[in-house]
Image (spheres, rainbow, N blue to C red):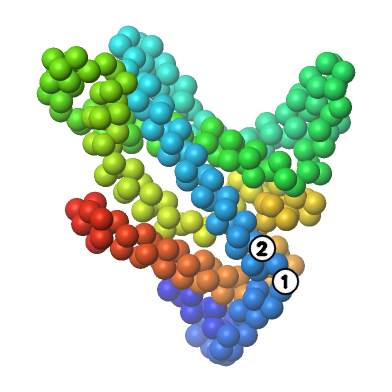
Amino acid sequence: MFGHVLAFKRYTVTKGFFNSPWCGLENFKFFFGSNAWLQITWNTLFLNVLFITGTILMALVTAIFINEISNAFFKRVVQSFVFLPYFVSWLVVSLMVFALLNGTDGMVNNMLKARGWDSIPFYQTPGLWPALLTFIYIWKFSGYYSIIFLAAIIGISQDYYDSANIDGAGKWKQIWYITLPLLKPTVITLLLLCIGRIFYGDFGMIYGIIGDNGVLFPTTDVIDTYSFRALRQLGDFGMSSAVCLYQSALGFLTIMIFNRVVKKNNPEQALF
């Protein structure tokens, strides 16, 4: 709460939190007064929708695939393999991405040149990055979420599948009519938790991979990176706090609306 209060104060280190004067909505003007606020809000929302949708779908498919593996040793190997990217820091990921995609000696462009094709200037092409960032995010987090789905699948009673086998249902029908419907509460809960932060960009990811490359800002600049640059250049804590309050308000409004929709359709699956 102290951080949100700073959004309405002209904070200085010498005067401290309590003695800094109030400034009303002055701190919000730098953000809403710029021409970029609508674009970066859209970028944050659009990228997070891609991240959440893609990650949950891939995690769901991965969990179902792992559950169908009968060999216990191979199942553990696959689980470890898909879970491993979660522990790789964004700094390491950003170095890997640069090694793959940079225009001079990147592995992807070297392979294209070896085949006689033109190289792709990835770091000068903004339109490519929503898809690239989504792929990277899915690679890193789908294994983590798949463990949650796998735990939910293990909790499904075997009686459902035994009854389906007696009725002659194959694996695909069992997945479609038993596994997926019973995973719906888990999916909704994860969506509610993710939507609460839908207006928060993954700063470590975006800044680590994109950095200060202004060419890519039209499609990759999010609220967090914008406010970080403002804090770094201006050193104004109040302005950065105002942006955080804006994010919190949008996130709260979004989760309330989504929870209301869920509650209207199925009250038992709503958060509150």
Quickly name the residue at label 1: 35
Relative to residue 118, is residue 30 drawn left or right?
left
Residue 208: x and y in percent read 66, 45
Question: At 51% from the left edge and 72% from the top edge, which residue is drawn?
Answer: 245
- Real-space Cα separation, disc 1 to disc 2, in angstroms: 8 Å
Question: At 29% from the left edge and 26% from the top edge, which residue is drawn?
Answer: 175
Label 1 sits on what residue type? Asn
Question: At 47% from the left edge and 22% from the top edge, which residue is drawn?
Answer: 81
Q: Quadrant of the C terminus?
A: bottom left
One can see residue 267 in this view: yes
Front position in the image: 155 or 168: 168
Tell me if residue 15 comes above or below residue 170 in the rendering: below
Relative to residue 254, is residue 88 drawn left or right?
right
Label 2 sits on what residue type? Gln
| Label 1 crowd (10 A; few <14 / some 14-19 / many >=20) | few
Secondary element under disc 1, as helix, strand or loop, is loop
Residue 129: x and y in percent read 68, 43
Residue 137: x and y in percent read 55, 39
Relative to residue 68, is residue 56 drawn left or right?
right
Q: Are marks 1 and 2 in contact (CB under 8 Å)?
A: yes
The quarter of the picture where residue 229 lies is bottom right
Relative to residue 182, is residue 76 drawn left or right?
right
Q: Which mark is residue 55?
A: none
Secondary element under disc 2, as helix, strand or loop, is helix
Tell me if residue 94 comes above or below residue 246 in the rendering: above
Q: Quadrant of the N terminus?
A: bottom left
Quickly name the residue at label 2: 39
